[in-house]
Every structure is written in C-alpha cells, then in structure tokens.
Image (cartoon, rainbow, N blue to C red):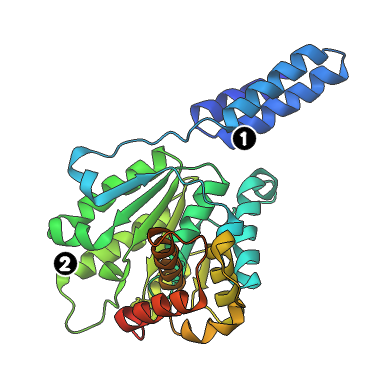
C-alpha cells in the first residue's frame, strides 16, 4: 500500500502541476503493490502512468494584452536532433539530468540549473536548444518576444515583465526570452535611455528572486552587448558558433536522408562554410523540394551546391 508520505507527495505534485514527480511517486507505489502480490493493480498503475506520459502538454494562455508577445508551443524535439559539438550535448544533457533528479540535489541544499543564457549568431541552435529542453522534459515552451515587448509597451515594460514572471511562478514551463539584447545592453552606455535601464534593472531583480521550477532561458545574438551584471544571475552560459566541417557533414547527411544522390557529403562541404545551422538546413530543404518538383527521387551534387550558394549569397557573412 502507498505510505502516508507517498500520498502527500502525490497530492502536492498534482497541485503543483509537476507531472515528473507525480509519475515517479506513482511508479514507486506500483512497485510496492507488485512486491506484496497485487500485480494486477501494479500493472494498472503503470499503464495509467504510461498513458499520462503521452498526453499532450497543457498550454496555458497569457492575459489578452500579452497574446501577440508570447508564442506558446508544445515541442517534440529531442536532443539527438540538435547537431552541435559533443561538449554542448554534454552540457544540455547535464541540465536535463539535474532537472530529472532535482529532488536528490535538493537534499544537499542545492538546486538544479534552470536559468540559462544562450549566445551566438542567428540560426546556430539557440531556439532549438530551448525546444529540446521543453521536448525532453514534456514541458510547454513559451517564447517571449522581447523586441516587441519593448516597442509595444514602452513606458510600462517593467509592469508587463512582472506579469510574465508572475505567470512563470505559477505555471511550470520553459520560458525563452528571445532577442534578449533588446533590454540586456550595458546600463552604462551613454546612448541608453532611462526607460531601458529601468527595464534591465527590473529583469535583474525578477530573475534573481525567481524561485519557481520553470526554466528561464535568455537568447542573444551578441553577448558583447550584454550588461556584465547579467552573467551572475544565470546558472549556465552556452556560446554557439557556426558549424565546423564535421558538423556541416552531419547536418547535410541528416537533412537529406534518403534524398541524397550518389555523391560524398565531403565534396560539398566547402560550399557550406560560413553558413549557420539554419541556413544549411534551409538549403537542403530547398534542394529536396526542387528535386520533388522536377520528379526526381534524389538530390544531385550540383543541385545542392546551387542551393547552398544561393543561401550564401543571401545570408553569408551576415
């Protein structure tokens, strides 16, 4: 039978909307029932837990005045889909492991890392990393469009940020503050307006005092623009770069899949150097679509090179 402590924890995890903890306790109860010979009940509990794991993530709505500033999603992205160096995979995997075993960490007075700063050129994997964290942990992803928040609510941005952080406290999820340099620039800059300094100070206070179980992820295209006071507020900082030769090969191979013609990936890599992860992916998609339109089942080397060069002309070096 379930112990009194298990029942209390089960109820608390339900009211906290903590499905990870709820499932863990439910499986512990199933194991106890199995040990005392109640195998039928144990199987039913396991079946219910398994069904719950496949239930769509519940997306909650922000207030009407913030609807067009926050994009809600339920990602199914997995870490294997993120083509980054192994060291990055290890760091993201550590974030996931700490979250899944946060109760073990808390027994020693520590907390899991959940305030993350992602920095790097556009299209290098920052947004996808947030999707991976949400997807792997079955959490909703809320993307806060910081540039729109600033332009639409100039003069009351701090108040809107407070609304968002109040939501973060009540509803567990992954919150991505995109285009973060819109507010994160250095406070001492001469051309910085007083409003922006107040917004940044407000964000610093909100993130420092946040004790929720949500992930707060800030993404910036230029880490050099950020105020130095920001860095100590984050548990981890991950710097992204454009893919090297080995990553370019993996990106193209994974994206083309069965559409790859009779050519070696290494023979086209030089045409992709300088492009971001997203630009290479888009070029591969363009080549696949063109092959489909001309009734071909494969992407030829020349077609892929053409699409890569088109992308380079449009975006390369930017």
Image side of residue 146 versus residue 282, left or right = left
Q: How crowded is the residue under tag 2: few (<14 C-alpha within 10 Å), some, or many (20+)?
A: some
| Residue labelled with disc 1 | 21
Q: Give x and y (percent) for residue 153.
A: 14, 55
Looking at the rendered structure, the secondary structure element under dot 2 is helix
Element on which disc 1 rests: helix
User: Visible in this render: residue 9?
Assistant: no
Quarter holding the N terminus?
top right
87, above or below 162, in the image? below
Looking at the image, which residue is at 19% across and 61% down? 150
| Quarter containing the C terminus | bottom left
Residue nearest the viewer, comparing 133 with 170: 133
Q: Position of residue 304 (x, y in %)?
A: 46, 75
Which mark is on residue 201? none
User: Is 188 situated above or below 217?
Assistant: below
For marks 2 and 1, give the CA distance: 41 Å
Q: How many numbered markers are drawn?
A: 2
Q: Which mark is residue 195?
A: 2
Whether residue 253 is visible to the viewer of this picture, yes or no, is yes
Foreground: 32 or 242? Answer: 242
Instruction: Answer with the quarter of the image where residue 183 lies.
Output: bottom left
| Residue 279 on image: x %, y % | 41, 72
Tell me which numbered mark, 2 or 1, is placed earlier along the sequence. 1
- Taking the image as shown, residue 64 lies to the left or right of residue 202, namely left
**Residue 230 drawn at (x, y percent):** 40, 70
Left or right for 197, reference 178? left
- The residue mark sitting in front, 2 or 1, is 1
Which residue is pictured at 53% across the width and 53% down the height?
Answer: 133
């Amino acid at each position: 039978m379930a112990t009194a402590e298990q029942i209390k924890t089960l109820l608390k995890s339900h009211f906290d909307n903590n499905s990870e903890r709820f499932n863990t306790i439910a499986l512990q109860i199933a194991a106890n029932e199995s040990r005392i010979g109640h195998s039928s009940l144990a199987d039913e509990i396991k079946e219910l837990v398994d069904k719950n794991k496949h239930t769509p993530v519940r997306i909650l709505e922000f207030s009407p005045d913030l609807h067009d500033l926050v994009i809600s999603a339920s990602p199914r992205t997995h870490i294997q889909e993120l083509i980054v160096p192994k060291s990055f995979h290890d760091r993201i995997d550590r974030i996931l492991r700490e979250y899944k075993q946060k109760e073990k960490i808390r027994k020693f007075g520590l907390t899991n890392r959940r305030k993350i700063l992602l920095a790097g050129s556009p299209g290098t994997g920052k947004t996808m990393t947030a999707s991976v964290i949400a997807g792997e942990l079955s959490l909703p992803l809320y993307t806060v469009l910081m540039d729109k928040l600033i332009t639409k609510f100039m003069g009351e941005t701090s108040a809107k940020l407070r609304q968002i952080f109040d939501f973060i406290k009540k509803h567990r999820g992954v919150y991505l503050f995109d285009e973060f340099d819109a507010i994160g620039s250095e406070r001492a800059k001469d051309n910085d307006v007083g409003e922006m300094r107040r917004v940044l100070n407000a964000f610093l206070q909100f993130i420092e005092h946040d004790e929720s179980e949500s992930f707060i992820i800030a993404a910036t295209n230029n880490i050099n623009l950020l105020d130095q006071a920001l860095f100590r507020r984050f548990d981890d900082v991950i710097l992204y770069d454009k893919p090297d030769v080995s990553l370019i090969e993996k990106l193209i191979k994974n994206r083309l899949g069965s559409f790859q013609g009779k050519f070696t990936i290494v023979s086209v890599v030089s045409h992709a150097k300088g492009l971001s992860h997203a630009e290479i992916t888009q070029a591969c998609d363009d080549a696949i679509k063109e092959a489909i339109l001309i009734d071909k089942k494969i992407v030829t080397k020349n077609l892929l090179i053409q699409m890569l060069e088109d992308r380079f002309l449009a975006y390369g070096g930017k």
